[in-house]
């Protein structure tokens, strides 16, 4: 199974398996503006994933968003080989970065935008996951009657979530909290340019030392923005969007006061039609990556 496959125009259901729950979303891509059909969280009791899967809305193709601990994502210089040999070359290029043999995993590549004015070598993202883990996930889905056709990752799900909100020829920064920390992505023209996992978690928004936590987070975000400027000089960053979460207002206020670019909270109604889900603005944070995965439509090639 490939990671980056084309999604059906008939709509896509995506889910994220989390401890004790499943976050899911279903999006219909047939309309000019993608339509959110369903989204939410299904609790899982006693590891009975089958019962939880049965409660997912709709039928048709399904996408799984892997948890960050289940795969490796690395930024590499693109190998100087013919297009049909890129994946094979990357497989051996990342061997030393994996805790399993490359032959025992599935590897895919995602091209990084390379505007004409850039002089450095083209780059690609490589993503790798153990075949045994993917097989377990596919068996779990098949046993529940799900047509699992796509494997996605949180970084590309976050990219998809905001693709319709980009300003042409300007990069968009997006921040969310995931299990492994803060996830900061920068996208350009609907493609992923840069990814950073920041050493902070959502607990900082609930701590008594919020100022110190915000200072640390601001510093890490600014370092990433500076690195982006060095790598993609001449392309401005339009704004920073925060994926909705608890206490997001405190986070936006703190970052807006410390960063020299606009900071806004993602308005899901600006990204897709939510008329079928009027409470979409109150969804738990984990649902947004499921929505992003359900928005997948394109093929991505090296």
Image (spheres, grey):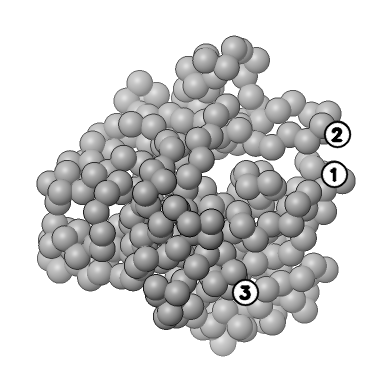
Residue under the image location 77 percent in, 60 percent down:
238
Q: Quadrant of the N terminus?
A: top left
Helix, strand or loop at mark 2: loop
Residue under the image location 71 percent in, 72 percent down:
263
Quarter-of-image position of residue 285: bottom left
Q: Earlier in the sequence, mark 2 or mark 3?
A: 2
Quarter-of-image position of residue 55: bottom left
Q: Earlier in the sequence, mark 2 or mark 1?
A: 2
Numbered disc in front, either 3 or 1:
3
Question: In x, y percent, where is residue 205?
Answer: 55, 80
Looking at the picture, tell me which residue is in the foreground, 71 or 289: 289
Numbered disc in front, either 2 or 1:
2
- Extreme residue toward the bottom, this view: 208
Looking at the picture, tell me which residue is in the foreground, 160 or 61: 61
Residues at marks 2 and 1 touching, judged by CB atoms closer than 8 Å: yes
Looking at the picture, tell me which residue is in the foreground, 190 or 66: 190
Q: Earlier in the sequence, mark 3 or mark 1?
A: 1
Q: Which residue is mark 3?
A: 265
Q: Which residue is mark 2?
A: 117
Helix, strand or loop at mark 3: strand
Crowdedness near tag 1: few (<14), some (14–19) or many (≥20) residues, C-alpha within 10 Å: few
Q: Where 256 sits versus 46, above or below?
A: below
Helix, strand or loop at mark 1: loop
Crowdedness near tag 3: few (<14), some (14–19) or many (≥20) residues, C-alpha within 10 Å: some
Residues at marks 3 and 1 touching, judged by CB atoms closer than 8 Å: no
Disc 2 to disc 1, how far (Cα)? 9 Å
Q: Which residue is mark 1?
A: 233
> As drawn, is 190 to the left or to the right of 203?
right
Question: In x, y percent, where is residue 213?
Answer: 63, 75
Residue under the image location 57 percent in, 79 percent down:
248
Q: Quadrant of the C terminus?
A: top right
């Amino acid at each position: 199974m490939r990671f980056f496959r084309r999604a059906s125009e008939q709509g896509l259901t995506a889910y994220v398996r989390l401890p004790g729950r499943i976050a899911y979303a279903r999006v219909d891509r047939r309309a000019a503006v993608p339509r959110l059909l369903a989204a939410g969280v299904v609790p899982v009791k006693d590891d009975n994933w089958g019962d939880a899967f049965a409660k997912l809305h709709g039928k048709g193709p399904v996408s799984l968003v892997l948890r960050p601990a289940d795969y490796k994502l690395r930024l590499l210089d693109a190998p100087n080989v013919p297009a049909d040999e890129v994946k094979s070359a990357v497989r051996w290029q990342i061997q030393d970065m994996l805790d399993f043999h490359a032959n025992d995993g599935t590897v895919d590549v995602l091209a990084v935008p390379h505007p004409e004015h850039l002089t450095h070598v083209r780059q690609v993202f490589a993503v790798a996951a153990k075949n045994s883990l993917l097989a377990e996930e596919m068996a779990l889905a098949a046993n529940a009657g799900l047509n699992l056709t796509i494997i996605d990752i949180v970084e590309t799900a976050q990219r998809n979530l905001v693709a319709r909100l980009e300003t042409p020829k300007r990069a968009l920064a997006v921040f969310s909290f995931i299990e492994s920390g803060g996830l900061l992505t920068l996208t350009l023209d609907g493609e992923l340019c840069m990814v950073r996992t920041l050493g902070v978690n959502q607990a900082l928004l609930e701590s008594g030392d919020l100022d110190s936590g915000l200072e640390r987070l601001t510093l890490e975000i600014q370092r990433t923005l500076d690195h982006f400027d060095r790598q993609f000089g001449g392309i401005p960053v339009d704004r920073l969007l925060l994926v909705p979460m608890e206490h997001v207002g405190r986070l936006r206020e703190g970052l807006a006061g410390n960063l020299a670019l606009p900071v806004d909270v993602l308005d899901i109604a600006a990204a897709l039609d939510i008329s079928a889900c009027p409470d979409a603005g109150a969804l738990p944070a984990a649902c947004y990556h499921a929505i992003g995965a359900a928005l997948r439509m394109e093929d991505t090639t090296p």
